[in-house]
Image: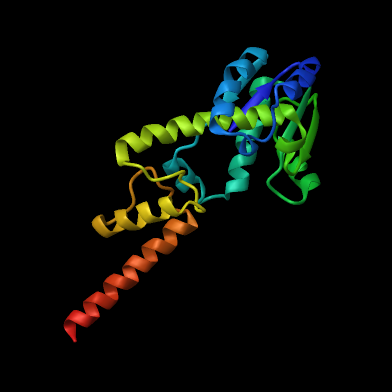
Amino acid sequence: MCGYLVKEGKIGELRELGVKDSKQLTPEKRESLVPRLKKMAEDLVVLSISPQEIDKLRTETNLNRIEIERMQQMIDLLCPGKAVIDAPEANTKRFREKVLCRLKHTRFELVAENFADKKYPEVGAASIIAKVHRDAEISKLHHKYGFFGSGYTSDERTIAFLKNWLQDNKDFPDIVRKSWITATLMKKEKEQSNVMSFISRTE
């Protein structure tokens, strides 16, 4: 996740640069924009969460709450006069109230909207930096574990990699969130397959 602090007077310049939702840009365009975005920023912060940390936190809370806590952390670090956040919940008013709760930095305007990265170039800038950072980390993991695609559930290459990994190993590698529903279902599928295999051998 990325928090991007920029002077309001530079938002028009972000639009002119073609800054928008990172998913609407090619990898090459995102990478070319990052140096300019960093130069224009007053400050920025990128927060990463390891799979192990997510798995541990999910025994106590959910992903939205984890995101909220990181948003609060970034707001307290950057101390903006106005913050615009991309709300993952449909009820944006309620989500806004959740983010405002327990903040140390309180004198600012907070806007919470769905798909804010498509409407606000400052949010688009944050999404671009976060995406480029993630892609760089994924590239490092490809070198270590072999190519596994994007790491998203929608990627058939990722699913195929995980299924093949489970065939040869008892559990997923450390780069996988074990609490991820996709991973949980795959483990159950393997366990059921092992049981059926054992039954067929003993009959």
Q: With 131 as the anchor, is 125 left or right in this view? A: right
Residue 178, horizontal then vertical, whole percent: 42, 52
Q: Where does the N terminus fall, quadrant-wise?
A: top right
Task: Name the quadrant containing residue 116.
Answer: top right
Q: Residue at x 61, y 40 (%)?
A: 67
Q: Is residue 68 visible?
A: yes
Q: Is residue 101 visible?
A: no
Task: Name the quadrant containing residue 25.
Answer: top right
Q: Residue furthest left?
A: 202
So how many labels did they put on this image?
0
Asked if 70 appears above or below 192 in the picture, the reply is above
Q: Residue furthest bottom?
A: 203
Q: With 171 as the anchor, is 7 left or right in this view? A: right
Q: Where does the C terminus fall, quadrant-wise?
A: bottom left
In this rendered view, identify the residue nearer to me: 152 or 83: 152
Residue 93, horizontal then vertical, whole percent: 81, 45
Q: Residue at x 40, y 47 (%)?
A: 176
Residue 179, horizontal then vertical, whole percent: 46, 53
Q: Residue at x 68, y 31 (%)?
A: 124
Residue 131, horizontal then vertical, whole percent: 55, 33
Asked if 190 appears above or below 100 in the picture, the reply is below
